[in-house]
Image (cartoon, grey):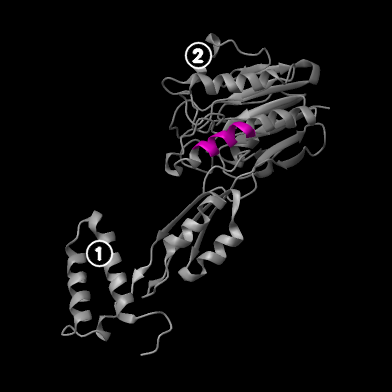
Amino acid sequence: MPKILHTADLRLGAKYLGLGKAGDKVRAQLKRAWTAIVETALAEKVDAVVVAGGLFDSSEVSRPAVEFVLKEIARLGKIPVVVVPGLRDHLGKGSLYYHFDLIDRPENLFPLTSADETLELKELGLTILAGPTTGPKSKESPLAGVEAPAGGLSVVVASGIWEGVNHPVTETDIGKTGATYAALGGLPAFKSGSAKKTAYAFSGPPEAQDFNTTDSAGVVLVDLEKKPVELTFLPLGVLVWKEITIGDPESLAELLEKEKGENRLLRVKLAGERKPAWFDVEETLNEYRDKFLFLTLSDERKFAREFKKYPRQTVAGQFLHLAEEQLKKATAEEKTLYQEVLDLGLSLAAGPVGEKK
């Protein structure tokens, strides 16, 4: 009863420079995700593991990252692990996959790097085919020309962009392979379906990796002998990435209290109209920074022009009009400072929140 574990798009070695020190923790969690995949394969007693591209974040990989992956693969013993180059770790110049023959790798690791390369698992009656990504750009589907043998069970492994322009994958492409199952990578979320007689799934990443990954992250268990093929999505992800927009800065503390967590990365956007207020956003953020893995805020509010309340002949009016004139002439670097000056000036002119005039 062949059962495989299908994963993709782990992106080991990703930099995450924009996260500062939190980037180190995210990278460490991606390594833990690979260990979790291996442990899941052992616990579920699968017959094979297939990686549909994106095991690494690029085609040039550090030796420690490769050694870590190989060490974990060796723990699987005789369970074969099939790895196919994907959208990020493609077969472009300097690709890791050109050097696999020089690496002391486990006997159960099978990198498939050409469309005419197959792996025959005779004891399972299973043929595994590949549609490797040959470079960063291609108008041709990675499944083009891949055709499963007649009879027996077969799995085609590839990475592409669903109905995209670059490395496109469509149901028509999938159906033409004639495979029992198409194990696909390249989408940020799990997606499954069938095309003619071929069941397929994009596994999505096993761990959430950015603010675009909002769905559950995990792997797919595939029972090839069931008719139709049985797919089970197993959540593995620990990280939670969220981007939330609010209009009232005074609701920030309530939001942060609700969303806090050591494995949570939160990006807050302030939108709407910037109004005079004494509320200190930065102070609130600082109170909660150690309660998140990562926390940041961008203020995208538009300034409320309420200068008519303060005639130019008044002290407040003169200050505000002068500040606005400086803002118009300011460089990109100076604009933030002058925006803060205007905000502070209006806040001082308006008086404490709630004060009646």
Q: Nearer the viewer, residue 157 or 143?
A: 157
In the image, is 108 to the left or to the right of 297? right
Q: Are marks 1 and 2 in contact (CB under 8 Å)?
A: no
Residue drawn 17% across the image and 83% down it: 312
Q: Nearer the viewer, residue 314 or 233?
A: 314
Name the amino acid, label 1.
Answer: Tyr
x and y, in percent, of residue 92 in the image? 44, 24
x and y, in percent, of residue 152 in the image? 77, 24
Is residue 10 shown to the viewer in this render? Answer: no
Q: Quadrant of the N terminus?
A: top right
x and y, in percent, of residue 83 in the image? 61, 24
Kindly report the secondary structure that dominates the magenta region of the rendered protein.
helix
As drawn, the label of residue 338 is: 1
The quadrant in which residue 108 appears is top right
Q: Of discs 1 and 2, which sits in the foreground?
A: 1
Disc tally is: 2
Q: Nearer the viewer, residue 11 or 275?
A: 275
The quadrant in which residue 78 appears is top right
**Magenta stretch: residue 30 in it?**
yes
**Magenta stretch: residue 131 in it?**
no
Report which residue position mark 2 lands on: 99
Magenta segment boundaries in residue numbering? 24-33
What whole-number distance in Å separates the C-alpha atoms at marks 1 and 2? 55 Å
x and y, in percent, of residue 69 in the image? 60, 23
